[in-house]
Amino acid sequence: MMDGPRSDVGRWGGNPWQPPTTPSPEPEPEPDRRSRRGGRSFWARCCGCCSCRNETDADWGPEPHGDRGSGRGRGSSSGGRRPDSRGSDSRRPGSRASGVNAAGDGTIREGMLVVTGVDLLSSRSDQNRREHHTDEFEYDELILRRGQPFDMVLHLSRPYESSDHVALELLIGNSPEVGKGTHVIIPVGKGGSGGWKAQVTKASGQNLDLRVHTSPNAIIGKFQFTVRTRSEAGEFQLPFDPHNEIYILFNPWCPEDIVYVEHEDWRQEYVLNESGRIYYGTEAQIGERTWNYGQFDHGVLDACLYILDRRGMPYGGRGDPVSVSRVISAMVNSLDDNGVLIGNWSGDYSRGTNPSAWVGSVEILLSYLRTGYSVPYGQCWVFAGVTTTVLRCLGLATRTVTNFNSAHDTDTSLTMDIYFDENMKPLEHLNHDSVWNFHVWNDCWMKRPDLPSGFGGWQVVDATPQETSSGIFCCGPCSVESIKNGLVYMKYDTPFIFAEVNSDKVYWQRQDDGSFKIVYVEEKAIGTLIITKAIGSNMRDDVTHIYKHPEGSEAERKAVETAASHGSKPNVYSTRDSAEDVAMQVEAQDAVMGQDLTVCVVLTNRSSSRRTVKLHLYLSVTFYTGVTGSVFKESKKEVVLAPGASDRVSMPVAYKEYQPHLVDQGSMLLNVSGHVKENGQVLAKQHTFRLRTPDLSLTLLGAAVVGQECEVQIVFKNPLPITLTNVVFRLEGSGLQRPKILNVGDIGGNETVTLHQKFVPVRPGPRQLIASLDSPQLSQVHGVIQVDVAPAPGSGGFFSDAGGDSHSGETIPMASRGGA
């Protein structure tokens, strides 16, 4: 699905984009653009003390400009030029060997203050990168977090004098403007505007040390950098150099940034942790897998900024985390805008990768950056894993959240409606709402200045394409506080997310006259458990309480009924019928793939009289999205219950019965319906369970040291009596192993296989090495091992380029894209 190019022009319609037939390695040159800005010189515009210059003085001449073809703007995130290319650019003013003087002819006059070089102190071991918590990025450029000062050194042609004027400039986008924040001018020693300023900390010989303060509201992205000087001998401009490009990110360490996070352990987990746990399965049978977010891997930051470019997001809006996170939720899926991932829930993944086979985000994002084409395929946990990578990379505290029994409300009723005929047989043509076994989305942390006070904090962002929002497949950011209280009129997309976590499941039975009557309401069937990885450990953190009041409490009922009153069926609760003498509970043993299983229904008579129950059990396979296959086994029983008594009804299921019907993730749905003869009570229950799959066993063979080869052993036993064909292993881990695919062929029934793989760690510290196995017969098989990497001897604890895995010299081809 969604394989070919789409005609959608994106959220900003003036920026159409279509995938190129062949990704263009270089943008087309664009003529120089010169601007006099009303005839006032640069210094007259930037600095009041210089506005009284002799009016006969020439202006600065051509203003700096960079690549702008094919959407490549000043300091844009990546562009047609490969990010690590260091060749000179004929379109930049001057050359690296010479500056630009006022006349624009490159002549350097005696006495001019010429900047001969700039040291941005940008290496991973330098103070700037450490203080800005960006030292883990596998980049050599300066990466900053906004609202926080940094240091640099200017190398000059002569000693700096008090009469000299120096200004720093940062530019981003196709048409940088001071008023939009895309052209930043910082006079050294003068009071800046909007939080920007630069001060001299030391002037020694021909070196000038500066401390530069960035605005906490700065645009995020990749800026070009230049320096202008003015002295009595003339004016000078430093040519642009790709070595001097500066990345600026959101800053959860800065109290003035609206993404500020108060707790350091939160920042360590939700911004800096490169791996995490994603939960799946059912509430009673929770599965978990480790995911390699890899937000600091080489190329990932460029891919994240490229996503904003591809959407055509205006650079002037990229300082707003509300807008940025909303664009990311739209762009991580491919619908509307040729985004990162193609969703596929069909079970046929022959034209791409089974979503269960991915072990991290890096391979996906780098493929999108390299080719410009959407990557096949993703499902909710893949969309959420990639979204966590992108938002953490850009500086937003983000976590991956799983909601069990997640509703998909298609008619804005804010209830899950299930329709039956007179005999309680489901009317599938009317059952458009569905309940997913689980659904995975993201929480990101920010203030919400666009909402009333009290709605900041965690915000839901969901990149899985389910329903459109303002005509676009995106969802959020939505305040978790508004979800908890049923305030569905708060933006963005609160009604849909509220229904996912806190709606009721309403059973409607058709009457003799054709109308429908509510026969049962399950109040605790939706959003039964909401969890995320705990801070600082691999334990689960139950966050259900921040999404909803305790089930059955007065506050919870008020939230549900408040929300429903704004839905398409505001009077749904006025038609309830509440005779509930007999209680029903479904039990399922811990079922294992390849083995027989048994399901049980327990009936309890809570009345003081005998009750007779006619019970009907239907078993079918189901996708985790609630889409079911045909019933392959059923059972009918009549049970007589004495007052206060309980009874158990069992249905055994053999492997040979369910094996021909299996779909992704081995999930099954048990539909139970019943009728109490004495009082007409209707019993209805849907219970989902999954077949557990084996784990991969990973063992490290020897110590792990930066720059030195080490080996891992992977062991797998086929749990099925049939041969697994076309088996593929995937292996990756940030700082350990770039994404690697291993094709191993067939594995016989109940056979055990052992693989050995070598890798070279490039970053020290605790790391996660993650593996998965996929075949047409078996998926959702994975494993992980923690690798504690020692620093290379004499390295000072930093990084190594050994084995070519740090990718500091790697070139990543860029696809063309639209910008603004």
Image: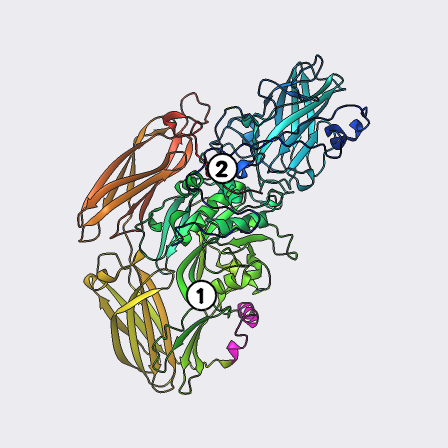
| Cβ atoms under marks 2 and 1 closer than 8 Å | no
Residue 563 drawn in magenta: yes
- Residue nearest the viewer, comparing 666 with 312: 312
Q: Residue furthest front?
A: 31
Q: Label 2 sits on what residue type?
A: Asp
- Residue nearest the viewer, comparing 619 with 476: 476
Quarter residue 191 falls in: top right
- Secondary element type, mark 2: helix
Q: Judge from the rendering whether residue 672 lies leftward or rightward of residue 234; answer left or right.
A: left
Residue 265 in sight in this render = no
- Residue nearest the viewer, comparing 262 with 737: 737
Colour option used: rainbow
- Residue nearest the viewer, comparing 565 with 525: 565
Q: Nearer the viewer, mark 2 or mark 1?
A: 2
Location of the C terminus (image quadrant): top right
Q: Is residue 141 above or below residue 376?
A: above
Count neighbours of disc 2 (C-alpha within 10 A) and say few if under 14, some if 14 to 19, many if 20 or more. many
Q: Position of residue 426 (x, y in %)?
A: 35, 75
Count neighbours of disc 1 (C-alpha within 10 A) and say few if under 14, some if 14 to 19, many if 20 or more. many
Q: Is residue 176 above or below residue 244?
A: below
Q: Which residue is mark 1?
A: 526
Q: Judge from the rendering whether residue 132 lies leftward or rightward of residue 802; answer left or right.
A: right
Q: Which residue is mark 2?
A: 302
Question: What range of the chain is rendered magenta?
Answer: 555-574
* Inter-mark Cα distance, 2 to 1: 39 Å
Residue 45 drawn in magenta: no
Q: Position of residue 15 (x, y in %)?
A: 55, 46
Location of the N terminus (image quadrant): bottom left
Q: Judge from the rendering whether residue 417 lies leftward or rightward of residue 142; answer left or right.
A: left
Q: Is residue 801 above or below residue 568?
A: above
Q: Is residue 688 above or below residue 820?
A: below
